[in-house]
Amino acid sequence: MADEGQEQTYTLTGVVYTADGNVANSTSIKVDSMASVWTDGSGAYTFSGITPGEHTVRAYFMNDGHTVAYRKMFFSDDMQLDWYVGHNWITAEVFDENGQAVENSPMTTVKLVDTGESNSLVDGRTEFGPYITGDYYTMRAYYGDIDHSTQYVHFKLERGSASYPDLNDFDFQHGMNSVYGFITDGYGSPVSGATVSTDSNSVVTNTDGFYLLQNLAVGSTQNLSFHVEGVQILDPVTTSINTGENWLNQSSTVDVEFPHNVSFVTQMQTITMSPITIQWEGGAYTDYYELYVGEVHEDNLAYRGFSESFTYTPTEAGTIEFNIVANNTNGSNENAPPLLIIVLPNSSGDELWSAGMSWDYSVLHTPEYHQNKTYTVVGMETVTDAFGRDTETFLLRVSDEDYEEGEKAYRWVDVNNLLNVKTYWVDAPSSSSYYQEGQLGWNFTNNGQQVNLLSGDEPTSLHFNRTNIIGVPGHPNGYDDTTNSITIQHDVEITVAAGTFMTTYISIVDNNDEIKSWELWYNSTVRNYVKIIDRLPGSHSDSVELELTAYNLPTTPQFTTEEGNISVNDYSIEWGIFEGATSYQLLENGEIIYEGTSTSFDIEDQTDGQYLYQLNAVMDLGFILPGDQFELNVLFIQEPPTVITTTQSIEEGQSMGLSWEPIENVAWYSVTSQDTDGVITEIYNGTDNQVVLDGLEPGQNRIRVQVGLIDGKVSEKSPSIFISVEDESASSGDSSSSFTALIIFLLGLMTLFVMISANWGRE
């Protein structure tokens, strides 16, 4: 029940199945314009907060053909509704001759003729299904409480759409009836797109040539006309409206050749704010085409002509729906499904790069040493350059096919000149503890004024500074500080492994020795340098040459978390901001585990296994754009407990406390002691993270702690601490020996004194 003063709301629950009754894949359920919910791994869903009254409910079978089903529902309580892919419901409401809902009339029923189902009304409504969409059905209303008359509709069960959500929802009104039928041509083929009209109503035949005219007054005479694009294809027909079925099939003898179907060749895709060529393919009897941006309306016309392609330049970001129409002198054909193109906006800060972009380079060192590296954008960060300036940078993860597990490298690249401001590399822990960290500064100027390298006034000078910290014992750090002259040439063509590019060529010459320290070839399409020659690399190489071999500027949402193997069970999945997205979906092995606006999601206590993560962006209009995928292999290794107590000495018989940092999901802790003879003894096993040690053997005791978890995982033993226990008997013996030695020493002194005194007396 709702709290006093709050509107009552209801909950819709159910399960989604495939057509053959198995649990369906991820499916979105939506009520009106409320935020959608997604089914869980068992196909179940729960949608809360539905107000009383009539609503439109939609199922979007995202991973089962990307199909939909729309239906009407009336809520006066919590409801349960199961969905089946490729199926939908038939709903109906019955009214009396005054237009009032027939609510309490047990003799008034609605029957689905094809199945024999007959339903009484609840609040004037009833429903049948779900049944296979695309099939035809006949439904009959029987007014048993009034005059035993009947009213029929014959129809094709549809999926529905956002524009037409109620195609399978029918209103029956006493005193009215329908006329329906199929229209064929002289060859028996259906005539689609024909307009069937009465004096006050008109409908258009579907692709099967079927039409349905509803709620015509019983006893009236109706004049029906039949036209296609204004051309009369049948003589007018006069018919009387009676109770019962009113079939009226017609066959046209007029041979009107309309354009055959036209369809888009270009597939749905995402693009940046740049021109795109839309292509289509027409059929016979086509004189010309019309391409519309949006609905088919003269105001939306983008192209009219004979060509089967058109280059469209978007003027704003968003989801664009293109419609294509084939025309000839007899009429038009606009049956082609629309084409959706998602145009991504420019980055919010006009940055050149965004998360997920990557570039592959062949890296050749002199003396000769070759590497293949991939640089992937994972975010942005402000760092301090070698001149002490705060610099906005892109953070890049460096991948190398020869890197060992645990070997890592990153680059921080200036957002304005795309040159390194900071570098970092650390060796694999299994190999060494070596690392290297570089801090760089690029001060580009023109007549003393600071400028950017790639935009605005071109620089003529560069002050370069670099410090390389080399974390190798005994290895000196590196330092460079140079002044340079710059020349820039535009429209320089260069061919590298990734292709042939028109570039801006930048030459940077050291003022001291006239050597070209750097040569750079920048291409705006790649948004990066396609070639770099670095003759001041700050390493053991004389020079380093980078050539672009491939690049990826994705137009779908991208993860920034790196795939691979991990040994922790608490971790975070992260992704970059995708311009134009209203929210994100994160799927784990096909099941949605997060939906929202955040760009990260924390996972805790993950079980061991292989996990495939999928990222989707929810765009405007609710369109879901599938994005990046990556795989994580989780094999959790529990770290040993961290012992708080330190190495110390105690006397025999003395007790002491031993403690360690607690660990979650513990099943047991084990404390062992190894004495001077190498004998290992378990001295504690329990769940507390502390214990009182007593009875330790005299001498040095090696103490270690181990943990076992509830899930069966067992850690290695902790680093050792040593407890030295002093032996009391040994201490007593030592004291006695010391006292005896002291007595002997004193007696010796006394004897010596007596002898010296005697000698003095004789003298």
Image (tube, rainbow, N blue to C red):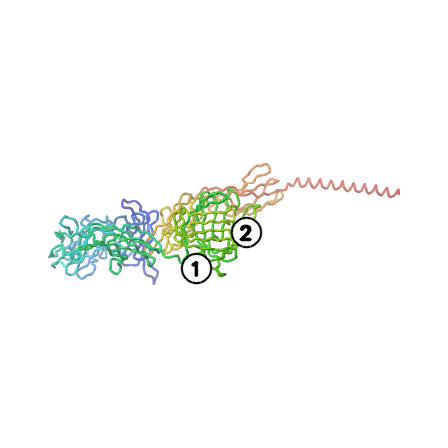
**Residue shown at 43% from the left, 58% from the top:** 455
The quadrant where residue 197 appears: bottom left
Q: Earlier in the sequence, mark 1 or mark 2?
A: 1
Residue 683 versus residue 637: which sits nearer the camera? 637
Kindly give the residue lying farthest to the front in the view shown: 514
Say whether residue 627 is visible.
yes
Q: Quadrant of the N terminus?
A: bottom left
Q: Quadrant of the C terminus?
A: top right
Q: Position of residue 190 (x, y in %)?
A: 17, 50
Q: Amino acid at mark 2?
A: Tyr
Label 1's element? loop
Q: Amino acid at mark 1?
A: Gly
Check residue 10 in the rendering and tell me which mark sits there, or answer none. none
**Camera-nearest label, 1 or 2:** 1
Kindly give the residue lying farthest to the bottom in the view shown: 5
Q: Position of residue 123 (x, y in %)?
A: 23, 57
Residue 706 versus residue 220: which sits nearer the camera? 220
Q: Is residue 320 left or right of residue 711?
A: left
| Residue linked to disc 2 | 479
Residue 603 versus residue 5: which sits nearer the camera? 603
Q: Position of residue 244 (x, y in %)?
A: 13, 53
Q: Position of residue 501 (x, y in %)?
A: 39, 50
| Residue linked to disc 1 | 456
The quadrant where residue 694 appears: top right
Q: Residues within 10 Å of mark 2 (few under 14, many from 20)?
A: some
Whether pointer 1 and pointer 2 mark residues with C-beta atoms closer than 8 Å, the reply is no
Residue 613 versus residue 387: which sits nearer the camera? 387
Label 2's element? strand
Say whether residue 126 is visible.
no
Q: CA distance from mark 1 to mark 2?
A: 30 Å
Q: Residues within 10 Å of mark 1 (few under 14, many from 20)?
A: few
